[in-house]
Image (cartoon, rainbow, N blue to C red):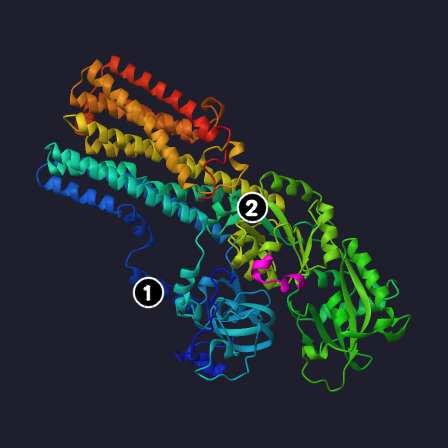
Amino acid sequence: MPARGRITSTTAPTTRDAFWAESPGAVLARLDTRATGLTAEQAAGILAARKLRRHHRHGLASWQRLLLSQFSSPIMLILIVATIISMLVGDLTDGSIIIAIILASGLLGFFQEYRANNDVAALLKRVEVTVPVLRDGAETTAPVAEIVPGDVVLLRAGGVVPADCRLLESENLLVDESTLTGESYPAEKDADLPADPSATLAERRNSVFLGTHVTSGTARAVAVRTGRDTEFGAVSSELEKKRVTTAFTRGTTRFGELLIWVMVVLTAFIFIVNALFGRPLIEALLFSLALAVGLSPQMLPAIVSVSLSTGARRMAKQQVIVKRLDAIEDLGALTVLCTDKTGTLTAGSVRLDEALDLDGRESAEVLRLASCNAALQEGFPNPLDLAILARAEPPAGLTALDELPYDFSRRRLSVVVRVDGAPTLIAKGAFEGMLEICDHAVVDGAVVPLDAVRSGVVDRYERLSARGRRVLAVATRTLADPIPALTPADETGMTLVGILAFDDPAKADVADSLSALERLGVSVRLITGDNRLAAAAIATSVGLDAAHVLTGRQIDAMDDAALAAGVAGVGVFAEIEPVQKRRIVSALRANGETVGFLGDGINDAPALQAADVGISVDTAVDVAKQAASVVLLAKSLAVIVDGITLGRATFANTLKYVRVTTSANFGNMLSMAIASLFLTFLPLLPRQILLLNFLSDIPATTIAGDRVDPERVQAPGRWDLRGIRDFMITFGLVSTVFDLLTFAVLLWVFRVDDTTFRSSWFIESTLTELVVLLSLRTGRPILRSRPAAALLWSSMAVAVVTLALPYFPPLATPLGLDAVPLPILGSLFALTGLYLAANELLKRRFLGDRPARLLRTA
């Protein structure tokens, strides 16, 4: 299965601005830049011009588009048009009030979404990916989005390519172009190689492209194309089509479709009934449309934005930065977490424990060779090399004559240095792979055939690995002088000289974090490049199930279907290569798991992209941080536990609004439909319906910060449309029953007129919506789950305003309300109390003993 969003066909040849066919000097001249880069003033001018062009292209600023979107739904537009028509035919006051309420409702939604967007933008600034760039002739850093044509960027292992660039100079440069070409192995790049104008992307070896990243080597390159003008931008529409939509997005869409069907049927019914009863068409249309607006939770986009941004802010306080908001739901829905070992299960402080010769003795010579290899390589610095150099520095004056950078297929690093005047290849890498390229070994100072000592060397390797040590081997080979260009073919016929054992002890608190994840229903799988013995030892030491270990070689022997069947009971994956990490993640997802992948290295990028939630750390290489949708400010399973808990709480609060609003609005609309059959007047005027909806939405906007009962976060949260539909119908019918009971009391007991009827039902409808919000926000008895202060106080404020409105003539008269006699008001309070009791009894079936009842997979 390809990684999410990957283009698996080679980009078609094009001669559009074929900069790869030009010399570096020609490209620099055409872009009016220098090999030392642009000045800061030039870059700022180009950025300003880009923003101006974007403004002209879109016509409106982002906040203006957001504001217009609050009023752009078809129902809202029809209501506005119908209201304007009503005003033109003479009902100016009524129409003006409706427009004012619509405007207030839209501004409330706009304010909430605008603030949420700003909050998220501020959080993203904390983890934005920057690249080294030359400005004013000096190295500085700039966000990827601020790289402009003419910028000279510096490329290093682990860094992202920020634009389509012509290489100016390069050294041992390997670039992963799989996002564009589908090729799993890194492409070799060389600034001096020529290319034809019609060359395919894979053939443009003197250029690098946006959307790719450096796996090893260094380079200096000039940015030629940025943004949508790049090769990556040209296929962005295809990428968008291929992008996997999240469960949250799918659930929101299907929920909207459900509401549209209910709304269309009831709105049409009410309009037809009112028209048949001879009521004015405009009045009947406004009434029906106001009801439609009342049923549709038009605040849902704002509530979702506020809930997610509130969740993002809370997560940031727990050192979790969410780059993609809908990843909050996916984080809360995790069932499997795949993680590496270093810094997550272990302390991350790698130490070279032993440098041994093949007799098992500490060896200064093995340590010296290892330090030469570690110090003279020019690739990406790694913890193992740093641990070696912490023990010993190489002899002074040594320089590397050539290098074969580390890659994840060879799993070794080789450098050539002069030892006693002769060019010597020193290789260091994974033990088993190193044995394959050696045919001799040094034992007791003598060179012997490797087969003569193989069993003893392997036995020592296995004993060290079983103690949780990571074991590398060191080998040498003398080369002819002068040496030709070094290739992997030179890594043969080598002599094994020693082994290195590294120690990285388990974290003290990791067992507690693993237990917490288990309680949350999240299983942890260890995926590591370490050998199977060391991986199993570490897993066992922290309490992970290491009974079944699957190795990279075993995975290579399986097709995708076999792998999906084979990963279910596996807790440890060892000796794994990058492409295999992606296959493991894809296999788990194929089994219906929601998968999170935690990684921070160059080799983790494919798996981060393939996972439902890619999780990296702020100190990760740029490509890992860019591929992730969640970035941790501290690499710790405890932080992930907090993130999952907060993700589930955020989703639970979103569902509170959905459940309460749909059930209450459905009940009110059904009551209106029934009332239309026997009342000789409209049960509520259009402006009263819209005002009721606006007032009830005010406390709903605070629900994002509501407290969540602990049992609500014990299971993953998912959309369940069947459960929501059943909830809406059940509690909507309860609302309708009490509405009809209210009608009977008002008409048959108190025999009220139409104005008093509307005033009374306006009060009762608002109070019941507030009561049901406080009741159905929790599965516990209402007095055993304290709501957040903002929700409680805003609900009380709206209740006070609702009760006061009919008694304040300057506002009541334009709204069509009148003072309600105290006996009737007392009856309304009693009915509201009975309604609360009915909801408290009924909600136990839906929310009481089964906290995940409404959180199943849709």
What percent of the width, then of the height, locates residue 555?
A: 64, 61
Horizontal side of residue 477 vs 258, given as left or right: right
Horizontal side of residue 518 vs 280, given as left or right: right
Q: What amino acid is labelled 2 in the image?
A: Thr
What percent of the width, then of the height, locates residue 192?
A: 55, 83
In terms of secondary structure, where does tag 1 sit? helix
Q: Residues within 10 Å of mark 2 (few under 14, many from 20)?
A: many
Q: Is residue 222 above or below residue 272?
A: below
Q: Is residue 289 visible?
A: no
Horizontal side of residue 570 vs 463, given as left or right: left
In which quadrant of the rendered view does residue 639 lie? top right
Magenta region: which residues? 553-563
Q: Residues within 10 Å of mark 1 (few under 14, many from 20)?
A: few
What percent of the width, then of the height, locates residue 488?
A: 68, 77
Is mark 2 in CB contact (under 8 Å) with mark 1? no
State the residue lying farthest toward the bottom. Answer: 482
- In this rendered view, identify the residue nearer to me: 215 or 850: 850
In which quadrant of the rendered view does residue 267 lie? top left
Q: Is residue 164 visible?
A: yes
Q: Specify the quadrant that holds the C terminus.
A: top left
Residue under pointer 1: 53
Q: Is residue 546 magenta?
A: no
What percent of the width, then of the height, locates residue 581?
A: 60, 59
Distance between the Cα atoms at labels 2 and 1? 45 Å
- In this rendered view, identify the residue nearer to me: 838 or 33: 838
Q: What amino acid is labelled 1 in the image?
A: Arg
Q: Is residue 281 above or below residue 6?
A: above
Q: Residue at x 25, y 13 (%)?
A: 822
Residue under pointer 2: 335
Q: Main secondary structure of the magenta part?
A: helix
Q: Nearer the viewer, mark 2 or mark 1?
A: 2
Q: Earlier in the sequence, mark 2 or mark 1?
A: 1
